Image (spheres, rainbow, N blue to C red):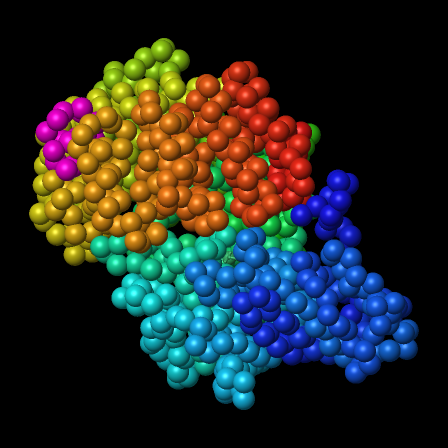
Amino acid sequence: MSKSSAKPATIYLKDYKEPDFLIETVDLTVELGEEETIVTSRLAIKRNDETATKLSLNGEHLTLQSVKMDGHMLTPDEYSVTDEWLHLPVAAITSEFSLEIITRIKPQENTALEGLYKSSGNFCTQCEAEGFRRITYFLDRPDVMAIFTTTIVGDGDRYPVMLSNGNLTLQETLPDGRKRVTWQDPHPKPAYLFALVAGDLAVVEDKFTTRSGRDVKLQIFVEKGNEDKCDHAMTSLKKSMKWDEEKYGREYDLDIFMIVAVSDFNMGAMENKGLNIFNSKYVLASPETATDADFDGIESVIAHEYFHNWTGNRITCRDWFQLTLKEGLTVFRDQQFSADMNSAPVQRISDVQGLRAAQFPEDAGPLAHPIQPQSYVEINNFYTATVYEKGAEVIRMIHTILGEENFRKGMDLYFERHDGQAVTTEEFIAALEDGSGIDLTQFRRWYITPGTPEITVNEKFDAETGQYTLTLAQTNLKAGKDPEPLHIPLKLGLLDVNGNAVPFSDGPFKGETEGVFDLTKKRQSFTFSGFSTQPRASLFRGFSAPVKIRQESSDDALAFFFAKDEDLFNRWDAGQRLASNILLKQIEDAGDGTSLPSAFLDAFAETLSDKTLDRAFTAAALTLPGEQDIAQKMPVVDVDAIHRVREGARRQIGLTFEDDWRRIYEECENAPSPANQPASSSRKLKNTALSYLIATGQEEFITLADSQYRKSKNMTDSVAALAGLKDINHPVREAMFADYYEKWQKDALIVDKWFTLQAMATRESTIDDIKALMEHPAFTLRNPNRLRSLIGAFASGNPVYFHDKSGDGYRILSGVIAALNKTNPQIAARLVAPLGQWRRYDKDRQDLMVTELEKILKLPDLSDHVYEMANKSLHN
Ligand code: B3K
Ligand code: ZN
């Protein structure tokens, strides 16, 4: 919350200064109560700057009861307290001293879900980035790493399970009947990795034996009744532990690893040392209750949080400007893991889809920032797609430039050199450089450059000499005037007219059919010789750099790559580019999407009948680019035209290939997936077929969806049936949605899907439906999952109605932001971004969006979180 009406302060990386004091040990006692919770903190403090005469501890929303320094009780005139700080004078000669601070808090009133709060009657914590200061006064910054001992005292009947980081060392019943437990964490850690949980929870247990032979107890705590939904999470955890040993040589370091699932959580999950706390969405699953996509999400988030144990916890960030040090690297690691567990090309396609959907618009808009921001008002606003997903692409580029072996050498050195430290991205890169022997001087620019680079491609072929020259030029509109060029890895393969790979006849990759070239200049040419006809270049294979390619490609050329490129990512991408080009052309010509050129239809047919492909890949290749993908390619976004032509094209594709879709539907329904493919691949393709069949508009396929829904024993098929019908007005649709709610109303995660499907519907009644859903007894602003399921899904996933020309969509969003501004500012701020895209729309919509942003900026008691996002959205 802003502490006064003054503009909130901006924090700059350049102002970083080492802490004046360090905290060596923390001994916390947390007495849980229904009215209030009392926190006693005993700190062993050591001077770090010999000139400092004042110790300032962070603290917010705390009631201070008492402070003792070296056993001496301080009187109020011996310290000063503000809304954000506790200041204590420290004599210049004092090098070490102890503090005992007693504070009172009210977790049951904490709706921001930061610090200690209650979820479904259980106590839990979220301390990253700056939540610990809402529990007690502390040096709440990641470069202060301390050894924690935590004692929890409370009603053992209400809260039989009491957990914190590390190992359980004591458990007893006090004379007054209360329960007391003590946990000791031997690993020094910053306060943001502290966790505490107390509640009446069920536990599912397993174990993992590390490669050095140590047994680790694995426990997943869930609300009672959910024990049977933990198998997938547990399996994913064991796979992650094994993978990190094999891939990076990293073993787990405590005797116990705990995961707790809670239903009220601002983010996906949190990597607290030895005690991960998860949004239940990323733990609970059974085929009846969770979709295949949910299963994938669980596998990757469990892995992500587990991998943080090394990349984040043992080696942490010096300050929050280094956030990508742990997040970019850990996303890269979880992407590698998912690629190893599943189909690598399908995984890569999904990673890039995510990047393009969320990060590219961010990087092109008013909230653009480098993966290492240089300033912030509220750090929680920087847990962004840029820091995470582009951050992961940056690590991936290092991996591509160094190669697998050298990358591992660099990572080994990083772990060896910095274990137990709080470090900077610069120290990370230096370790990678030293370990691999490869210079990354120019590459470092990626860390401080915002914006997506655009690469213009020109080709020249000299039939006489047989020389083929590829010229690439890089520009970046967001990187300032005349920016220095970035070091961009170009993974390249050349194909002959038949689509066969042609080996390089000279240069560093002589004899090979694929190579990684270093693009380091603003404009750079690569010449290849030995061709009798002009080759075709498959550029940036596997999406080897997070760039946009600007290349005049004919439909025929794109259709060629769509049908023939052996790099499956590029094959998919060519199909997407081809489809986008066609749809954009139709928009230009005011078409309806139905006249699709034969180059497209032929290539589509080829993929449709190629039985050698993974069914999940086929499904991705046969899905048209999303409306938001197409929008990114228009100078002024026309949501209605995009929707019209895309739906027209889907109908046309449905009709043209109706027999194929029927065949595919049958095959996928009745024949099991080929041995090397999971059953989910078949469901994916089957449901793609269903969606095209429904798009034909024929009644028979509404019946097919209905029967799929009725027969379905798994959530994937049920949701696909609902999704297939969500946009139409039909009694079957109404009956299906009513039945689904009736059946699943007790399961919050499933009800979330029900809200989301309706939030993304495109029917004339959509806006009214959303308003009615906001009044639905099951809707609440208090639960972040529920809020995202309706409002988040609407604002980010329903371009046609969010941008309805009445402005109602914008008003719904700004109303919710206003309602959440005080209760949960972190979530409120996250909702601002869709309005920040206003410059991309026509004048009328711009005005409407700007009006809402202005309204938000005038809210009474505007939180710093929302202020920063709305202010930048309006003025940057
Ligand atoms: N590190 C946490 C995110 C914390 C968010 C704070 N607002 C989850 C993760 O990235 O693993
Ligand atoms: Zn993370």
- Please report the residue visible at 84 percent of the width from the left and 78 percent of the height from the top: 95
**In the picture provided, is 442 more to the left or to the right than 784?**
right
- In the depicted view, which residue is nearer to us: 7 or 331? 7
Q: Position of residue 770 (x, y in %)?
A: 39, 32
Instruction: Assess whether residue 181 is covered by the magenta stretch.
Output: no
Up/down of 455 relative to 207, above or below: above
Residue 65's x, y, as percent?
73, 70
Q: Where is residue 427 drawn, in percent x and y?
A: 65, 61
Question: Along the line of sight, which residue is nearer the eye, 34 or 13?
Answer: 34
Q: Is residue 735 visible?
A: yes
Q: Quadrant of residue 651?
A: top left
Relative side of 109 to 717, left or right: right
Q: Main secondary structure of the magenta part?
A: helix
Query: Is residue 27 shown left or right of residue 530?
Result: right
Please say whether residue 418 is visible from this viewpoint.
no
Q: In what quadrant of the picture does the C terminus appear? A: top right
Which residue is at a point 63% across and 28% down the rendered structure image? Answer: 854
Of residue 603 and residue 871, the one placed in the foreground of this image is 871
The correct choice, above or below, for 186 with respect to 83 in the image is below
Where residue 422 appears, as percent x and y from the top left, is: 65, 65
Q: Which residues are magenta?
A: 692-706
Which of the pair 571/674 is nearer the observer?
674
Q: Quadrant of residue 563?
A: top left
Q: Looking at the image, which residue is at 19% across and 36% down?
A: 735
204 left or right of 100?
A: left
Magenta span has 698?
yes
On screen, 40 above or below 443? Answer: below
Residue found 57% across the figure and 19% down from its top: 847
Number of marks in the rendered image: 0
* 96 to 853, vertically: above or below: below
